[in-house]
Image (cartoon, helix red, strand yellow):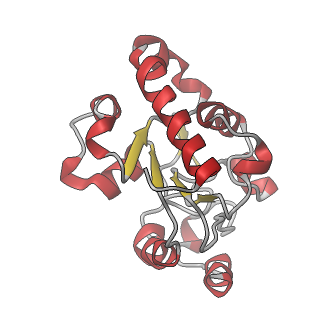
Amino acid sequence: MQQLLEEIASCKACKEFLPLGPKPIVAGSPHSKIIIIGQAPGKIVHETGIPWNDKSGDNLRKWLGVDKTTFYDPHKIALVPMGFCYPGRGKSGDLPPRHECAPLWHGRLLDMMKEVQLTLLVGNYAQAYYLGSRARNTLTETVKNFHDYLPEYLPLPHPSPRNNIWQAKNPWFGEEVLPTLKERTRRVLDQGKRI
């Protein structure tokens, strides 16, 4: 696994498209119990080299009910974005994750993580890639029907503060999805038993 992470760290597959240059950010271990598949690092994450080291990460940790020590323990949680490098800014926020990363690296990474009991699909890009035709027409519908994808996957919206309006419009997320997410996270991390 360490060799693979070193290969990823030196990847330059889409160098010419990255405004700040390649700096792949990923974390995991053969013993990871939960995989969080997100979008791509933002600028703060690119600068610090720490995944989910921003307000979105703070929100995600609240959703999971875990502290930073637990969140950043790769034996517990793997952090695998769809695009490993900061893609740059677009007109209305960061650009989409580069499409090269997932086909190049995800299969090899996930094959080495034999103890995973829960995979969180954060945002449209992860859901489209991993759910394919099983995804609903919208992210809202996919997340609302999260039970259909358990126990393998649990789809989530992106935890960006920009999505506070979405959460206010969809109170079922806080009432149904977050309690399930916290409970499954706790059971996996506390007991390590398949649920």
Q: Is residue 143 left or right of residue 185?
A: left
Total number of numbered discs in the rendering: 0
Residue found at x 61% / y 26%: 161
Residue 94 on image: x %, y %: 56, 44
Q: Residue furthest bottom?
A: 3
Residue 156 on image: x %, y %: 44, 37
Q: Quadrant of residue 53?
A: top right
Nearest the eye: 50 or 100? 50
Q: Is residue 127 left or right of residue 28?
A: left
Q: Quadrant of residue 30?
A: bottom right
Residue found at x 66% / y 69%: 22
Nearest the eye: 145 or 52? 145
Residue found at x 77% / y 59%: 49
Q: Is residue 91 visible?
A: no
Figure quadrant of the N terminus:
bottom right
Residue found at x 33% / y 57%: 130
Using the image, determine if residue 123 lies above or below residue 103.
Answer: above
Q: Is residue 137 left or right of residue 61?
A: left
Residue 164 on image: x %, y %: 54, 19
Residue 102 on image: x %, y %: 44, 68
Using the image, determine if residue 101 lies above or below residue 80.
Answer: below
Nearest the eye: 96 or 61? 61
Using the image, determine if residue 9 lies above or below residue 49.
Answer: below
Q: Is residue 40 left or right of residue 44?
A: left
